[in-house]
């Protein structure tokens, strides 16, 4: 399975992060351990939600869409 995941900073609740992984629990641990350049400053992070895909291609396409303007409003309304 491949996952698009949604994180919220517990330190700065207005800070959010959307990412892609095949190992969601391990990836959250990496974020909280400071192993990601983009999320290091705002740890700890909590997992808000995720979407699972069988296809890596579809997961990456969905990640691109939710980070773009076309789906950004949907994400803000439904995930945060």
Image (tube, helix red, strand yellow):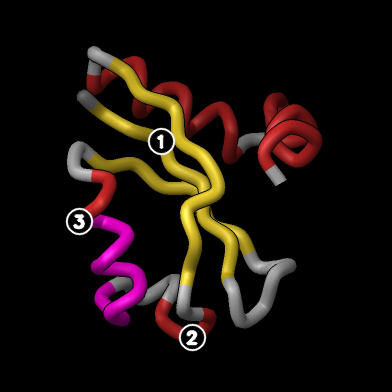
Residue 32 among magenta residues: yes
Instruction: Give the camera-side residue of 47 and 57.
Output: 47
Mark 2 and mark 1 lie on one chain; the one further toward the N terminus is 1
Question: In this view of the protein, which residue sits in the foreground, 66 or 79?
Answer: 79
Q: Which residue is mark 2?
A: 41
Q: Residue at x 44, y 72 (%)?
A: 39
Residue 20: percent from left, percent from top:
34, 41
Residue in the image at 25% along x and 51% along y:
25
> Are there few (<14), some (14-19), or many (20+) residues within 10 Å of tag 3?
few
Q: CA distance from mark 3 to mark 1?
A: 14 Å
Magenta highlight range: 26-35
* SS state under label 3: helix
Q: Does residue 57 appear left or right of residue 4 in this picture?
A: left
Residue 35 in the image: state x and y as whole percent: 25, 76
Question: Callout 1: helix, strand or loop?
Answer: strand
**Which mark identifies residue 4?**
1
Kindly tell me whether residue 11 is visible in this rendering.
Answer: yes
Q: Is residue 69 visible?
A: no
Numbered tag placed on residue 17 in the rendering: none
């Amino acid at each position: 399975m491949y996952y698009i995941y949604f994180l919220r900073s517990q330190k700065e609740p207005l800070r959010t992060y959307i990412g892609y992984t095949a190992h969601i629990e391990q990836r959250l641990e990496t974020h909280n351990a400071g192993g990601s350049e983009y999320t290091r400053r705002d740890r700890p992070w909590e997992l808000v939600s995720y979407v699972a895909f069988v296809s890596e291609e579809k997961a990456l396409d969905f990640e691109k869409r939710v980070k773009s303007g076309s789906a950004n409003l949907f994400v803000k309304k439904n995930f945060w």
